Structure formats: structure tokens, C-alpha cells
């Protein structure tokens, strides 16, 4: 549910960021009712050019929007705003946020690692220990995913110690909550490493600590779901099947509500396994096929869940269902291929770009101390001169190109021979491609002319079926005439009609030169100013703001 293009509620334009934040904080993660107030926050920050608050607004949008692709768009916006703010900590935090979306929501580990390494790069000289430890935690996640459990455990121990020390401090509730979340996530991931290292006594201890100390289950519901999952797996290992299912089912409900599909797929596998061991084959197959469904949807594959396909293949063999056996076998082969490829690629990259990067930092730090003042001064003078010359040359070249394009466009509109973009003066000819008679085609062309003369194309939200109905035709015939005789798609025909109408107004009546881009956008029925500007550039080869400026300059000379 993207926020772009929505008008801000003016009532809240004068409200403080703190007051709007209070309205936002009333909602839980992925509750899109909060987006109305997030929009207020973002619009206020944009109007004030307050990049710090704008970054915060985009982070809130990521938190409350359910749509994963929307989350990525907001993450990109946060990175852009952070770079404009020119604060390394904010840039690092923005990259980290985008990496988290790739890791947890998209399960695209290579992309996640790229973002984490960018976050690490910008945090090198940071004094924000919370940020540094958050990055350590997420790098631990990648290490753990790759199977480097000992290395990951060391990273989680570092982050857990930091967050535990800080969560008991008398801090702002939000900061306290962040440290609590960091602590519980760290010890849960640490317990998973211990499980994979077969240090079960350490795993059991951390699961017990998590369930014992985690009291804020409303705001830390996801973390609570993780420990329920961990407890369920622990009980399953001890063959306490009924107790295990109780914890796993509770975890399923929490993770499903939070759309944590990567963790949910693991829970599905263990529920399926528990039912299988309990002799409840039907319930087991239901959950194991849920695993397969999520694999097909997200290609979330780990060695931990691949065993689900072995159960499914075994069942298909017993039922002599060769079709399903072949399907599950192919799925398992694909899963193994993805695991081998994905793990190998990430393993190679993390050793080159993360571990080596730490050593390069020390080397580069020593080199930078030598003659740094002289280097900076020389580079500043040289760079400044080059940039200045480049900007002057580019400006002159651009103005020359704009003048030429404006003159060409103006002449085309004033020339009757080139004024019709649809070549209506050309007679309709019957070719092998014609699916309709000349009379029918000519009738549609005349109806389109009337459609244009009455300026019905200025209406908003027009589609091919709507326009076909407006002119008394049908969509197939109209599409055929536009494609074969106008040599245009419907979309191109509509945008051309609208843009040429606006262009003609700007050339003929000076009052329209003082209209805002938003005003011109509304006049021609387009969705928003960005769409209008893109279409104007596509049709006329010049931006609307440049065209208006050139037209005003021309009128001043008259």
C-alpha cells in the first residue's frame, strides 16, 4: 500500500512529529491502519525538507506496510534521503534496513549480504554502538545461514552481551524495546547455533531464559514466537510429541500473523514431522505440503527443511503414486541445487568482503594519516575546477539542445502538414492484415475524431473498454484500428492526445504558462505529476518545466 500520490491530511500539517509518532505507535507491526499517520509524517518532512525525519517516516512505512515490494521501495527512499542528509550512521542504518527486508521477507541472501556489507562500510567510524551491534547481529545471521555456526555464535554472543547490558538502563521506552528485541533475538539465534553444534544443554538453557524473561509478549510477539518454536523443536528432539505440537502450533499462529515466512516454513516442517512420528499421516502431509507451497512461492530453502521432501517421497512410494513421487523428487533436486549454489556463492563473498575488509580498514587508516592535508587541498582545487568547467559546458550544451527542441516542436504544431500525429490524412487501404471492412474501419476513425474534438480524452481513468463504449464500438475493433491504422497502442494514443492538447494550450494561451504542473496534470486527466512529466518528455522530447520556461522566454522577446 504505497503512500505516493496521496494528499496529506491538512489537519495534521501543523502537528509536531512527536504527536504524529504517538498516533503511529498505537499500532502493531504490519498494521496498515497506521499508514494514514505515517503519510502525514512523511509529507510534513518533505515539505520542511527535514531529511532526518523523512528517513524516520520511511522506516515507519517499512514497519507498517504488509507488502514486501512496497517495503523495498520505502527502503530505497530511506537510502536516498540518508545520502541527502549526508550522515554515515543514517546511511548505514538505511542499508541495514534494506538488507533485513531481503533476508527476512524476500529470503534473497546475496542481496541481503550486499546491503549488510554496505551498512558495515558506513559504520566503520561510527560511535553508535547500538548500530554496530545490530550489524554484527545481522552478519551473524548470514554466517549462521551459511553453516558457520561457531563463527555465528561468537557474533551473537557479542550482540547479546551488548543488548543485555543496555536493556536494563533507564532509557526511552522505544530504545529500551529495541535493546530488549536485540537481546532476545541474539540469544535465540545463539541457541540455534548451539543446536546445530549439538551443544543441546546450552541450547536448552537459552530457550528457558528466553521464555522465562520475555514478559512483553505484545510488543515482542515475533521474538515470543521464536522461543515457542525453539521449545517445540527441543521437545520434539526429546520425543515429547504432544507437548512439542502445543508450542509449535502457538509459534505457527504468531509467525503467520507477522508474515515471517522463513521461520514459518521451518515450523510447518517440524509440525509435519511431529505428526509423522505420532502416526498421524494425514495431518503430517498437510503441513509438509504447506512447506512445499512456501518453497514454490518464495524458494525458501535450508538444509533443515529439505527432509520434508524425503517424507513426501516416502509417502508417495508407499501409495504407488509415481506422479507425486516424481514431482517431489524433482523438488528435492531443485532444493539441493539451490542450497549448493546459494551457500557456495555467499560463503565465498562473505570471506572476501567482510573478513578481509576489517584488515583493509587498518591498512587504509595508516595510509590516510600521511600527507592527508596536502592531498585534500590539491584534490579540492582540482575537483572544484573540473566540476565547475563541466557544469558550465553541460549547461550550455543543454540549453542549446532545449532551444533546438523547443523550436522544432513549436514549428510542428504550427505546421498543418505535421500537426496531426495520427496521419488521418492517409487513406485507409485494405491489406492482408485487415480483419474488418473499410467502411467499419473508417467509421471508427470518424468516431475517434469526434472523441478528440469533444476532448473526451481528458477524462480520468480511461481504459480501452471504456473508450470503446464511449464511441459506440468494442475493444477488439478499437484496438485493431489503433494498432494497424494509427500504428499506436491505446495507451500511446491516449497519452499523445492528452500531451498534445496541453502543449497546444501552452503555445496558444499564455495564462496556462502560469499553471502548476499539478494543475496541468489534472486538466488532462493523468494520475499524478510524475506520470505527466514522463509522458510529456516521451511525446515532446522535452520536460514540461523546460518547455514552459522556453515559451516564456520567447514571449518576452516579442
Image: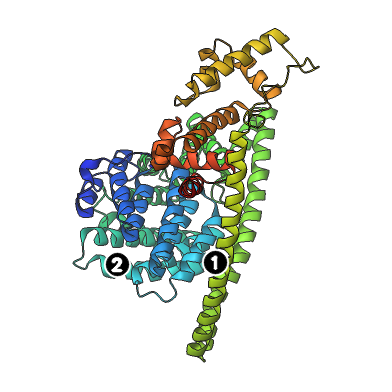
Q: Position of residue 192 (x, y in %)?
A: 45, 58
Residue at far right of view: 432
Q: Is mark 2 on a helix, strand or loop?
A: helix
187 or 401, which is in the foreground?
Answer: 401
**Residue at coordinates 57% horizontally, 44% vertically from top-left?**
299
Q: Position of residue 308 (x, y in %)?
A: 56, 42
Q: How crowded is mark 2: few (under 14 residues within 10 Å), some or many (20 or more)?
A: some
Image mark for residue 177 = none
Q: Is residue 70 visible?
A: yes
Q: In this view, does 451 lie above or below 129?
A: above
Image mark for residue 391 = 1
Q: Is 25 situated left or right of 259 in this image?
A: left
Q: How many labels does the image show?
A: 2
**Residue at coordinates 37% horizontally, 62% vertically from top-left?**
187
Q: In this view, does 260 lie above or below 278?
A: below
75 or 403, which is in the foreground?
Answer: 403
**Residue at coordinates 51% horizontally, 45% vertically from top-left?**
547
Q: Residues within 10 Å of mark 1 (few under 14, many from 20)?
A: few
Q: Is 401 situated left or right of 272 in this image?
A: right
Residue at far front of view: 558
9 or 236, which is in the foreground?
Answer: 9
Viewer-nearest of labels 1 and 2?
Answer: 1
Quadrant of the rendered image containing residue 330: top right
Q: Is 110 situated left or right of 170 in this image?
A: right
The residues tagged by marks 1 and 2 sit, at their Cα atoms, a distance apart of 53 Å
Instruction: Kindly identify which residue carries mark 2.
Output: 164
Q: Quadrant of the N terminus?
A: top left
Residue contact between numbered discs 1 and 2, judged by CB atoms under 8 Å: no
Q: Is residue 256 visible?
A: no
Q: Position of residue 524 (x, y in %)?
A: 46, 31
Q: What element carries label 1?
A: helix
392 or 9, which is in the foreground?
Answer: 392
Amino acid at each position: 500500500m504505497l503512500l505516493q500520490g496521496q494528499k496529506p491530511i491538512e489537519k495534521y500539517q501543523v502537528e509536531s512529529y512527536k504527536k504524529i509518532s504517538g498516533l503511529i505507535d498505537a499500532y502493531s507491526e504490519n498494521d496498515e491502519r497506521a499508514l494514514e499517520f505515517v503519510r502525514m509524517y512523511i509529507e510534513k518532512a518533505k515539505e520542511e525538507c527535514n531529511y532526518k525525519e523523512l528517513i524516520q517516516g520511511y522506516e515507519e512505512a517499512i514497519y507498517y506496510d504488509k507488502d514486501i515490494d512496497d517495503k523495498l521501495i520505502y527502503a530505497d527512499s530511506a537510502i536516498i534521503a540518508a545520502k541527502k542528509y549526508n550522515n554515515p550512521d543514517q546511511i548505514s542504518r538505511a542499508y541495514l534496513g534494506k538488507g533485513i527486508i531481503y533476508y527476512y521477507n524476500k529470503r534473497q541472501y546475496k542481496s541481503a549480504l550486499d546491503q549488510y556489507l554496505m551498512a558495515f562500510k558506513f559504520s566503520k567510524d561510527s560511535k553508535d554502538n547500538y548500530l554496530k551491534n545490530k550489524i554484527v547481529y545481522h552478519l551473524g545471521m548470514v554466517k549462521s545461514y551459511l553453516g558457520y555456526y561457531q563463527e555465528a555464535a561468537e557474533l551473537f554472543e557479542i550482540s547479546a552481551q551488548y543488548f543485555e547490558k543496555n536493556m536494563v538502563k533507564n532509557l526511552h521506552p522505544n530504545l529500551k524495546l529495541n535493546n530488549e528485541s536485540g537481546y532476545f533475538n541474539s540469544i535465540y539465534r545463539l541457541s540455534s547455533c548451539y543446536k546445530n553444534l549439538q551443544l543441546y544443554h546450552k541450547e536448552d538453557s537459552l530457550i528457558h531464559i528466553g521464555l522465562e524473561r520475555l514478559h512483553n509478549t505484545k510488543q515482542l510477539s515475533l521474538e515470543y514466537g521464536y522461543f515457542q518454536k525453539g521449545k517445540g523443536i527441543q521437545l520434539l528432539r526429546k520425543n515429547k510429541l504432544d507437548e512439542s505440537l502445543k508450542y509449535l502450533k502457538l509459534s505457527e499462529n504468531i509467525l503467520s500473523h507477522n508474515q515471517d515466512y522463513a521461520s514459518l516454513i521451518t515450523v510447518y516442517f517440524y509440525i509435519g514431522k511431529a505428526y509423522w512420528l505420532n502416526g498421524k499421516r494425514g495431518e503430517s502431509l498437510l503441513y509438509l505440503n504447506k512447506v512445499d507451497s512456501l518453497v514454490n512461492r518464495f524458494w525458501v530453502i535450508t538444509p533443515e527443511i529439505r527432509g520434508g521432501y524425503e517424507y513426501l517421497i516416502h509417502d508417495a512410494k508407499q501409495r504407488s503414486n509415481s506422479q507425486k513421487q516424481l514431482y517431489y523428487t524433482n523438488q528435492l533436486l531443485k532444493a539441493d541445487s539451490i542450497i549448493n549454489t546459494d551457500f557456495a556463492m555467499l560463503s565465498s563473498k562473505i570471506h572476501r568482503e567482510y573478513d578481509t575488509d576489517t584488515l583493509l580498514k587498518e591498512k587504509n587508516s595508516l595510509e590516510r594519516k600521511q600527507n592527508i592535508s596536502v592531498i585534500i587541498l590539491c584534490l579540492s582545487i582540482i575537483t572544484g575546477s573540473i566540476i565547475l568547467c563541466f557544469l558550465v559546458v553541460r549547461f550550455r550544451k543543454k540549453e542549446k539542445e532545449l532551444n533546438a527542441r523547443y523550436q522544432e516542436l513549436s514549428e510542428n504544431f504550427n505546421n498543418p502538414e505535421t500537426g496531426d500525429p495520427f496521419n488521418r490524412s492517409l487513406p485507409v487501404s485494405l491489406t492482408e492484415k485487415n480483419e474488418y471492412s473499410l467502411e467499419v474501419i473508417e467509421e471508427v476513425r470518424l468516431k475517434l475524431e469526434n472523441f478528440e474534438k469533444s476532448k473526451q480524452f481528458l477524462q480520468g481513468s480511461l481504459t480501452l473498454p471504456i473508450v470503446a463504449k464511449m464511441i459506440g464500438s468494442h475493444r477488439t475493433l478499437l484496438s485493431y484500428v489503433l494498432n494497424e491504422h494509427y500504428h499506436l497502442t491505446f495507451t500511446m494514443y491516449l497519452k499523445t492526445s492528452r500531451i498534445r492538447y496541453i502543449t497546444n494550450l501552452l503555445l496558444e494561451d499564455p495564462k496556462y504558462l502560469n499553471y502548476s504542473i499539478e494543475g496541468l496534470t489534472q486538466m488532462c486527466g493523468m494520475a499524478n505529476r510524475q506520470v505527466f512529466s514522463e509522458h510529456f518528455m516521451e511525446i515532446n522530447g522535452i520536460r514540461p518545466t523546460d518547455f514552459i520556461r522556453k515559451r516564456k522566454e520567447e514571449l518576452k522577446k516579442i
